[in-house]
Amino acid sequence: MIRVILIEDHDLTRVGIRAALQQREGFEVIGDARDAKSGLKLVKTAQPDVAIVDIGLPDFTGIELTQQFKQAQASGECPNTRILIMTMQDSEDTVLAAFAAGADSYCMKDASIDKLAQAIQTTAGGNAWIDPAIARVVLHQTQKVYSSNQHSPEPATISINRLADEDLVPAYPLTERELEVLKLIVDGCSNAQIAEKLYITVGTVKTHVRNILNKLCADDRTQVAVRALRTGLVQ
């Protein structure tokens, strides 16, 4: 059972998400708040597995809430709670600020309940979940960092807080074709769409996807996209 709290100022959105999650097996919504101050207090007292935080809160932003919580977490409070930012904003500044603040995952508000459930499960499991709708924003940042480090004697790393710690280099290099497939995965293309764009069969695409999963030690396409963004593999 994944214990969740919601910090969202829009009543209908908050009530709707809560009702939808309570109807799904494996989730327990243990509390909610409509502003950052009470939400931060709730996170500290309830100690959920995942806190879903809206960016546009009335007193101070979800990004500021995340910063304050992560500072408290560093001192030993709520060590197992992870932050999933939920918002309608997909601007580069907002997305990068959220991750720099320490957000573990980022989901758009127009996501389906199935996608939100997947995001919560992934986040609760200790992995980052990045909505495909904003993946290109983080990809753009990693590309800039990757390019700026090409002539540096030091190993390239990603400057966004939560994306700088691990998975810097795949165990085995990707082929040129696998990199092409990886780019399209990050763009959110299905196997059929990839096959059409690259003029290859769907079976061949599946083989490339399987090889990419193995080389990046990933369980699914979402993890592949996250690791591609972390490493700057897609140029």
Image (cartoon, rainbow, N blue to C red):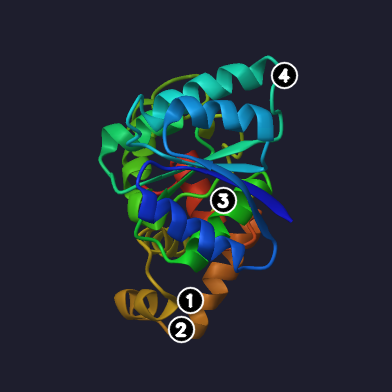
Residue topped by disc 2: 202
In the image shown, does 160 or 87 lie closer to the viewer?
A: 87
Mark carried by residue 67: none
Residue 167 sits in which quadrant? top right
The 10 Å Cα crowd at callout 2, few under 14, some 14 to 19, many 20 or more, is some
The circle on residue 76 is 4
Distance, label 4 to label 1, CA atoms, is 46 Å
Q: Which residue is located at x 43 percent, y 65 percent? A: 181
Q: Is residue 221 left or right of residue 12?
A: right
Q: Nearer the viewer, mark 3 or mark 2?
A: 2
The residue singled out by tag 3 in the image is: 173
User: Do the numbered discs 1 and 2 sit on residues whose CB atoms are within 8 Å?
Assistant: yes
Where disc 4 sits, the SS reads: loop
Q: Cα distance, mark 4 to mark 2?
A: 49 Å
Q: Secondary structure at mark 2?
A: helix
Which of the two discs, 4 and 2, sits closer to the camera?
A: 4
Foreground of the two, 16 or 95: 16
Q: Label 2 sits on what residue type?
A: Val
- Which is more foreground, mark 1 or mark 3? 1
